[in-house]
Amino acid sequence: MDRLAYWRKQARLIIRRSEALQSLSSEELATFAREMKWKARSGVSLSQILPEAFALTIEASHRALGKRHYEVQIMGAQAIFEGHIAEMQTGEGKTLTAVLPVALRAFVGKGVHVVTANDYLAARDAEEMGQVYQQLGLTTGCVTQDMSDSERLEMYARDITYGTASEMGFDFLRDRIKKGADSGLLSSRKIFTEETESSMPVQRGHYFAMIDEADSILIDEARTPLIIGVQEKNKDAVISLYRWCRTAIRNLEINRDFLFDQRKRTVFLTESGCRHVTLMSKPVLLDTIDTEQIYQHIEKALTAELAFEKDRDYVIDDGEIVIVDEGTGRKMEGRKWQEGLHQAVEAKERLDLTESTGAAARITIQALFRHYEHLAGMTGTALQARSEFKRVYNLKVSVIPTNRPCIRTGSPTRVFVDQSSKFDAVIAEVKTHIMGGRAVLIGTPSVEASHALSIKMKEENLPHTVLNALYHDQEAEIVKQAGQRGRITIATNMAGRGTDILLSEEVRKAGGLHVIATEMHSSKRIDRQLIGRSARQGDPGSYQFFLSLDDELLRVMRPSQLQSLKRRANPNSNGELSSSWVRRFESLQGNLEKRHVHLRKQLLKFDKDQKKKFRQMGLDPYLEVAES
Ligand SMILES: Nc1ncnc2c1ncn2[C@@H]1O[C@H](COP(=O)(O)OP(=O)(O)OP(=O)(O)O)[C@@H](O)[C@H]1O
């Protein structure tokens, strides 16, 4: 029997068992849960107690939330228990599914980490699912960004802890730093006093990590390692250098003085550029800085100027640069670009320069999750990344069928010559759907684009709501309203993964939520997550893509290539191009995906070599500051 058929057979058995538990009193249910805990802790194999434990958890879920798991959810839960990535379509109820394997492993008492794509989901899921765990005598915690060490310690001591990969990873690194300080292996004492409040590690082990939105965390986020920096005070000369570079670059010419690679986000000063920079007059303070360092800072300033855009790559929050994650559209509080880039962006925006950070402890997402005794995950979009899951994490992908057939419909993609004609067409489309009594969600790639579309909508007197990194606080309320009749919600990727837009009965009858994607992202998976906000759990729903030659995706092309493409375009009077242009976008997206796979491979190789070197030196491979 294949695995799927086996899981289905088991699921049916588990459902029957759980129904038999309905007559138990609360005390009897609690006694049953204690018995499970005892069995799990006294060495009975978890596979053996799985049917009973799942049945019990289903009954607990019914009592706490009024929801009983569907057959397919129990199948997905078994896949997760067996250490697979369960691919379950968007809206199939992964949050509830995860409760089954999480509770089972939590009975063991070694702590389970549930990793979510952002803080909002961590808090939401911990609170909601915590009610189920409570019925089972299991405690739930959640780690969020501004918690103190003692609060973290308490949260990790609970049976189940929710949090983002960054929170869990940074806690892992800080614990490593503390251990390093204890063993005297490294001169981490300095970092230890600055970075942490107490010498006690906050995590108690790495037994089981259940990763929600597994492709986002294990694949997309894995492009950026987690780094804890030691603050280095900026000398006056360095501050003056950043400021001077900001103005000096105005005198440099692209392709003569420097080369710019948009795709790699790198700048290279040519010989002519170096000569120019050397001959420019500079403040006396810079006399102490060597020429090579000046060149490097000029390159950094140019990179900040050309490759990083306000309201797309970062936002300014209370006078500080906050990085925005491309995949999720969310602010990545606390993260900083390395090697002076952060300060170069600050100088570009004329903000106070923060202290630069040198790396002290560093871990890749890949290395972090390999530490766990058991690892599994779930997502709506795993299959495409199947070989990477296998190669990097040794995780299998299992595709779980849907509970009810998905009736989402898509209309053909439309391509326009520029953003303005694209937005005009989007607005016309929105009006049609709103008049038909539906709700519309419009996905934009950046805060800037969401504002631009919002301005156009205001001109057309179309009431709408904007959800982006700047309106983060109102997220729950905006999402709650987004499925009501006549609602128009413009959102960045924040309304992608995990966002559950509940439809009013009127909207459901009128055809459900219509999603308009105003650009293609760097990965097909991100696009699929956006359109997956519609037609969930068998509801009706639809989507359509509107693209233009001004789109972000086309910026990976050389400017001359893009110009010639635009010249060859032959739009109709509304600025619309023929449907054959769609293929060009698809192939650009495909190339970008391949490139990202390659970058992640390189990062892994670098990390492996680095760790080997540190181990040979008898040092902790995650701590980079050697005795000085
Ligand atoms: N067994 C169930 N009975 C009733 N309602 C359910 C059940 N399972 C899930 N739901 C509901 O279905 C909706 C979708 O669930 P959820 O948001 O967890 O989906 P998801 O698979 O995580 O989607 P996405 O991939 O988009 O994040 C929620 O409103 C949830 O409460």
Image (cartoon, helix red, strand yellow):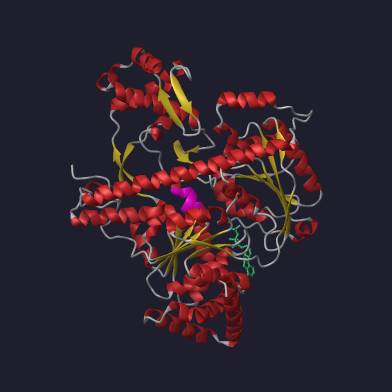
Is residue 37 shown above or below 298? below
Towards the viewer: 590 or 361 = 590
Towards the viewer: 38 or 51 = 51
Q: Is residue 503 magenta?
A: no
By secondary structure, the bulk of the magenta-drawn segment is best described as helix
Is residue 149 shown above or below 106? above
Quarter of the rendering containing residue 271: top left
Residue name at image x 61 percent, y 70 percent = 72
Is residue 469 in sight in this rendering? yes
Name the quadrant of the N terminus.
bottom right
Towards the viewer: 506 or 530 = 530
Q: Position of residue 427 (x, y in %)?
A: 74, 39
**Horizontally, is 539 left or right of 495 in the view?**
right
* Identity of the residue furthest to the front in this view: 1
**Horizontally, is 578 left or right of 4 in the view?**
right
Q: Which residues are magenta?
A: 216-222
Q: Position of residue 69 (x, y in %)?
A: 60, 73
Towards the viewer: 366 or 324 = 366
- Ligand 1's quadrant is bottom right
Is residue 162 shown above or below 428? below
Q: Position of residue 347 (x, y in %)?
A: 41, 28
Q: Position of residue 445 (x, y in %)?
A: 59, 41
**Horizontally, is 42 left or right of 532 in the view?**
left
Q: Is residue 217 magenta?
A: yes
Residue name at image x 36 percent, y 82 percent = 42
Name the quadrant of the C terminus.
top left
Quarter of the rendering containing residue 274: top left
Is residue 485 shown above or below 106? above
Quarter of the rendering containing residue 492: top right
Is residue 144 in sight in this rendering? no
